[in-house]
């Protein structure tokens, strides 16, 4: 497994709140690069975040009408209001009343992967917008699903994970701004990136090596690895694992084939390897995932 943040404690904002007067109500990982937590704050306090290195979506559940972001004093919190805090943001928050809130933490690598797979674009051309106390009915509906789930139960963890995926897609479509086109230094050219992506998808069931992928890109392995990471936000092995997990999820959702066959078709070799990687990344076993999808 790679080093992408996944557990709540892997995320800086979570750790900052853990050291504050806020009370943690519950928390859970929701898959690779994404975690959720729910908090209660009852004491007056000012808390700050300084370039946490990950994205945070915050939803006020109750209270917060007297709380505000320092420098944005005319905007106040309140039930149903969201904040979107990019990885490189800096902020201080004056909490002046009882507040119950939900946090969704997203690793930049995870959002970058989604940008490539969902939008087929260079992640570095996108910039998550810093937004304070916005209202968004579509996000409210998704967060109701998150709140209604028991994150420690396998089937509910899957429902929560699916809702989190919907949030990711919403942020990519509604919450990002495209930077002005600039020459990408150190990254793969768009045509090369697409060629590598198509090659990986066509050979997921096979053993893939860095030399093979570098050959597809017509680069040395050293330069390919660096340029791939620059373009995709994560190293080749982590990105390929993500594609294999996506293939396995699709095959499991169709309900066809045994786990051994699905493991081979998605490049995990055997059922035990698939189960270990799937559980670590998704939070449930392949069998639990298939069973939950069959009930929907």
Image: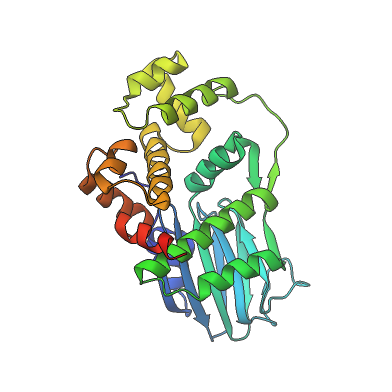
Residue shown at 54%/54% (left/top)? 51
Residue 156, position as x, y percentages in the image: 42, 69
Furthest-top residue in view?
A: 218
Residue 99, placed above or below residue 140: below
Q: Is residue 283 something that shows in the picture?
A: no
Residue 75, position as x, y percentages in the image: 75, 72
Residue 105, placed above or below residue 173: below
Residue shown at 54%/25% (left/top)? 194
Could you tell whether 273 is left or right of 43 in the image?
A: left
Instruction: Residue 150: name its quadrant.
Output: bottom left
Instruction: Residue 151: name its quadrant.
Output: bottom left
Residue shown at 47%/80% (left/top)? 21
Instruction: Residue 135: name its quadrant.
Output: bottom right
Could you tell whether 87 is left or right of 254 in the image?
A: right
Furthest-front residue in view?
A: 256
Could you tell whether 32 is left or right of 193 in the image?
A: left
Residue shown at 57%/73% (left/top)? 144
Residue 14, position as x, y percentages in the image: 45, 66
Residue 217, position as x, y percentages in the image: 46, 17
């Amino acid at each position: 497994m790679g080093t992408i943040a996944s557990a709540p404690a892997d995320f800086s904002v979570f750790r900052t709140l853990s050291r504050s007067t806020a009370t943690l109500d519950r928390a859970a990982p929701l898959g690779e690069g994404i975690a959720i937590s729910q908090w209660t704050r009852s004491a007056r306090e000012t808390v700050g975040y300084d370039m946490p290195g990950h994205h945070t979506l915050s939803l006020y559940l109750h209270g917060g009408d007297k709380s505000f972001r320092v420098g944005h004093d005319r905007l106040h919190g309140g039930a149903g209001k969201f904040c979107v805090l990019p990885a490189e943001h800096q902020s201080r928050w004056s909490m002046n009343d009882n507040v119950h809130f939900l946090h969704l933490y997203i690793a930049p690598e995870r959002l970058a992967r989604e940008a490539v797979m969902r939008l087929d674009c260079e992640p570095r051309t996108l910039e998550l917008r810093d937004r304070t106390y916005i209202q968004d009915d579509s996000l409210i509906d998704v967060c109701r699903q998150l709140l209604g789930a028991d994150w420690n139960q396998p089937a509910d963890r899957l429902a929560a994970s699916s809702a989190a995926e919907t949030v990711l897609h919403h942020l990519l479509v509604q919450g990002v701004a495209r930077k002005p086109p600039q020459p990408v230094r150190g990254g793969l050219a768009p045509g090369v990136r697409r060629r590598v992506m198509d090659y990986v998808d066509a050979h997921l069931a096979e053993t893939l090596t860095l030399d093979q992928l570098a050959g597809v890109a017509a680069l040395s392995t050293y330069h390919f690895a660096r340029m791939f990471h620059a373009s995709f936000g994560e190293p080749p092995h982590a990105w390929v694992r993500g594609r294999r997990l996506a293939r396995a999820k699709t095959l499991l959702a169709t309900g066809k084939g045994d786990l051994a066959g699905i493991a081979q078709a998605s490049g995990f070799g055997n059922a035990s390897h698939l189960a270990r990687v799937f559980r670590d990344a998704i939070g449930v076993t392949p069998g639990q995932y298939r069973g939950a999808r069959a009930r929907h």
